[in-house]
Amino acid sequence: MIDLVKLHVKAGDGGRGAVAWRHEKYYPNGGPFGGDGGDGGDIWFAVDTNETTLTKLRFTRSIKAGNGAPGMTKKMHGKSGEDVIVGVPLGTMIRNAANNDLLADLTEPGQKVLIAHGGRGGLGNMHFATARNDAPEYAQPGEIGESLDLQLELRLLADAGLIGFPSVGKSTFLSVVTNAKPEIADYPFTTIEPNIGVVSLPDERGFVLADMPGLIEGASEGKGLGHEFLRHIRRCRVLIHVLDMSGSERNPAEDYEIINKELAGYDLSLEEKPQIVVANKMDDEYAGLVLEEFKQKYPDLKVYEISALTHEGINEVLYAAMEQIEQAREAEEENREAPEETVVYRYEPKRPDFTVESQGPRRWKVVSEKINRLVSEIDLDRDDEAYQFAATLQKMGVDKALYDAGARNGDQVIVGDYIMDFVE
């Protein structure tokens, strides 16, 4: 079952600013004319209602957005990189694989979230002209786009879920009450991916029904399809527990006990979900006797008798499920202010480009990937480049941040692989 996928995403890098000069007929000594680099492309994830699994991303190791183009002469901006929009099914949860933080929970049709920001384009040399240097030979490189490892997890958003041991008749039930076409056969684990259908009642009400892969003992510990199965159940409002009452292969009383034990072992909240117990295969000649034994063990349990094969008793189950679903929907509306899990991703301004750290008496360090990249691309032995670099740091607010932190004239400042003197 493809409902858990890991991949790496990399937003586009910003393009480098241009170093160019104005050379026109009436401007023989024109000043700096270099434009800014284009911004890198962003990476978005959006709900695609045509997708029902994460299968298409199964063999995708990484996703990369387009880089911004370099700036051009005549102060023209470089073209921004192309954004990438990744379509995923409704119910997809996106986590940061490094710390398991929930970045986005896509639970609404049309929902779209920004996961990785593209880097900003570098400034062209037209921004660095000063009274002291009216011909700057310096332009900024673009910022590096954000990159991170993601874990995508699909949890079905079904109103009701069919649960039960393999081959108890869940797929047959689904095919009878919806337009779904699940594979049906007389062997375990016919269903290895969830099947979904829409139940339409005669009174024009309806709900989404999912047939989950069969459960086995030990599923809460990950055996068989365990965790993949149980992960989906958490989002169902109502559980329809199907039991094979023919008794030909299994003991329904033991099955009922084992499955509820596995639900509680995985997540105690699953014990509280409404559960409709269905005695299937009542067309079998011994089903009546087996049902009597089951009722003796669970005398207070309401059991719906059906035959998915002959369609008998189906409507009673559907109307009971509809009633429970509507009650669950009303309760969700009342408790909407208390979400199940908080999304930690926020669309706030980007983090500061740098931080200042004390390295001991009169020694400071500027920590910044952006500034380290700037240092690596210039020659500080050249006075003009060193001056422009210093001017860039001042514009970024590095000088002020150092002074506010306590730096004074003559203090040493570590920037990248260089040690510089601080001048107020």
Image (cartoon, helix red, strand yellow):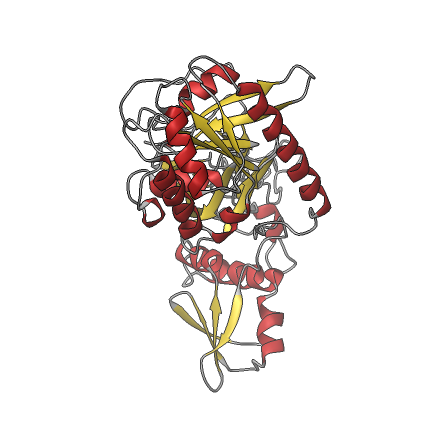
Q: Residue at x 40, y 40 (%)?
A: 256
Task: From this view, report whether residue 291 is shown above or below residue 199.
Answer: below
Whether residue 63 is visible to the viewer of this picture, yes or no, is no
Where residue 183 appears, as percent x and y from the top left, is: 36, 17
Task: From this view, report whether residue 49 is shown above or below residue 292.
Answer: above
Between 16 and 180, the one lying in front of the other is 180
Quarter holding residue 130: bottom right
Quarter holding residue 376: bottom left
Between 212 and 341, the one lying in front of the other is 212
Where residue 319 appears, as percent x and y from the top left, is: 62, 25
Between 34 and 71, the one lying in front of the other is 71
In this view, the residue farthest toward the bottom is 361
Between 17 and 49, the one lying in front of the other is 49
Task: From this view, report whether residue 300 is shown above or below residue 283.
Answer: below
Q: Residue at x 57, y 67 (%)?
A: 398
Whether residue 60 is visible to the viewer of this picture, yes or no, is yes
For this view, does 47 lie left or right of residue 201? left
Quarter holding residue 109: top right
Where residue 143 appears, as percent x and y from the top left, is: 50, 48
Counting the numbered discs, the total is: 0
Quarter of the figure with the N terminus:
top left
For this view, does 160 lie left or right of residue 347? left
Quarter of the figure with the C terminus:
bottom right
Where residue 409 appears, as percent x and y from the top left, is: 56, 82
For this view, does 407 lie left or right of residue 338? left
